[in-house]
Amino acid sequence: MPFPEQFLEELEAKNPIDEVVGGYVNLNRRGGRLWGLCPFHNEKTASFSVVPEEGFYYCFGCHKGGGVINFTMEVEGLDYPDAVRFLARRAGLTVPEDEKTASGYRYRQRLWELCRDAARFYHETLKSPEGQSGLQYLLKRGMKPDTIVKFGLGFAPNRWDGLMRAMEEKGYTRKELQDAGLVRTKKRQVQKEDGSITETESCYDWFRNRVMFPIIDVRGSVIGFGGRVMDGSEPKYLNSPESQIFNKRKNLFALNVAKKTKMDMLVLTEGYMDAITMHEYGFDCAVASLGTALTDQQAAMLAKYTKQMVLCYDGDEAGQNAAQRAIGILEKTGVSVKVLKIQGAKDPDEFLHKYGADRFKRLLGMSEDQAVYRLGTIQKKYDVTTDDGRVGFLREAAAFIATMESPVEREVYGGRVAEIAGVRADAVNTEVQQVLRQSRYRKKKQQEKKDLRPAASAQPEVSGIKYENIRSARAEESLLAQIFLEPGLLDKCEGLSPEEMSSPELRKVFSWAMDRWHQGLPVSVAAMRGDFTPEEQSLLIGITQKNQSLTVNEQALTDCIGLIKSEASKRNSKDLMAAVNRRRDHTGYKGGGAL
């Protein structure tokens, strides 16, 4: 374990799980638990629970669970050591680091510092004669000097080693520059005078002759850059490569600023300039993706800071497809989604410069509900003035309306579809009901099929974990549930070897519990912390939750141990026979002598 037990206990004591979770989820007490809407999956009825007295959370919907450190890892997208540091800062504690963990963190800090110094270099270059083309470009785009400073915009000089030399003078190594994604290494073969071939390696700046946009994470660290080329070469926009500190799928441009907005929404744009111009005109709710389609990780980040997202994508086919995809991803997080259609300009940047903030505010207020937008997109595919077009539109629109959970929504949008197609509302409703019946029938058949496979239904709900021996695993689950309800029963488990358990995950938990018991340390779900993956913690908490009414006594424990040993013996016999058969196949052995 990388952190001392005493420190972790103090960390958890000063970060009560109900207070930490309460910063992300609206919790209400019901019975002995606190309940709220799960931050990890889309739901309308609260199935996410927190048990403050025992220090863990568990969602009965998506089956995620763990202690306060695991929650922080999940909700903030951090690894275990960084989640500990996050909570330590929250509680004002100093983290005692072991050398291995501290070394890795110090190196990431070094890369953050390097990127910060690189951003300063680019910014200073923008103000120098060497950066005049970049500065004039930004000013021509209508950007104000204070906006340039606010977002730390800069310019990468049109030299092969401008940044590299500047950073080396500050003491950074080429390896650090390469690990931060700021330089590239190129190998080439050179022929020497004697005719022999030798290989040389040269380094050069990743960004050259580009206006630079620092990418800053939600904690305020510069983690990478986006660069807009000045000479018309390709690619037009270039982002930092993936690194130890930069992952474009898990970050968004300007979210570090937009997360503080007082507006009741966040607006997702396609480009850096769109987001920056919106901020410049007073709409400090704008963010931009980093050259990729919206990802699940980005959607989860956005959902932490708002309950309403407005998509502002280009109106071309590519933009519409991106919007459709983003709507589906965002809806999974539970946020409300609207779509803003830019009229009279190609993007928010152009619109604001042409028409100003007041007209953009009115336009923003006219953003379409995602359902209206989707129906409009479906309508564009058909000529509803023809019979075939109306039928095609009605069928596809009915299939979409059938996905709506609320009967009221289905009736409202069904009426809209009927009006567009020129048919009666009850005709649309009939089509929707037929789609719903077909959907329910398919789900019923799928459930029946699952029910007929008891082995499949007995598998864990946690993704990525599968039991090979259901009979033994059920006994192992029951054994662990009893142990975590009454750790003193571990004294009765001395005759059971962890290797006799069939599930690697349950074996790991049992071995961990025995070790802690022998060391006189508490055995509890909350104590699992960094020794286990989030999936392993979720598995164990799920086991304890579904076995809360389990009878805890020595006889029940003995029965579980007996069954586990019996199944282990069967496995060992099969393994032995398999080994004998392999040897017979290999040597031609027919029996009658020593193996």
Image (cartoon, rainbow, N blue to C red):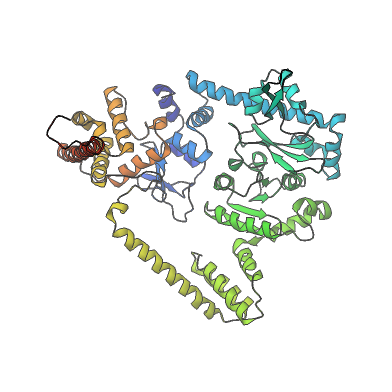
Identify the residue at image location x=61%, y=82%.
387
Residue 50 appearing in the image: no
User: Looking at the image, which is closer to me, 197 or 6?
Assistant: 197
Assign the N terminus to one quadrant of the image: top left
Position of residue 454 measured from the top left corner of the image (x, y, whole percent): 27, 55
Position of residue 34 measured from the top left corner of the image (x, y, whole percent): 41, 45
Position of residue 343 measured from the top left corner of the image (x, y, whole percent): 76, 61
Position of residue 59 measured from the top left corner of the image (x, y, whole percent): 41, 47
Residue occupying the far left of the picture: 592
Residue 416 appearing in the image: yes
Does residue 246 sit above or below 549 in this rendering? above
User: Looking at the image, which is closer to me, 236 or 294?
Assistant: 236
Q: How many marks?
A: 0
Residue occupying the far front of the picture: 195
Does residue 346 sit above or below 423 in this rendering? above
Does residue 137 sit above or below 321 in this rendering? above
Identify the residue at image location x=40%, y=44%.
464
Does residue 221 sit above or below 442 in this rendering? above
Assign the C terminus to one quadrant of the image: top left
Please indicate whether residue 345 sits to the left or right of residue 366 in the image.
right
Identify the residue at image location x=51%, y=40%.
75
User: Looking at the image, which is closer to me, 216 or 384?
Assistant: 384
State which quadrant residue 128 falls in. top right
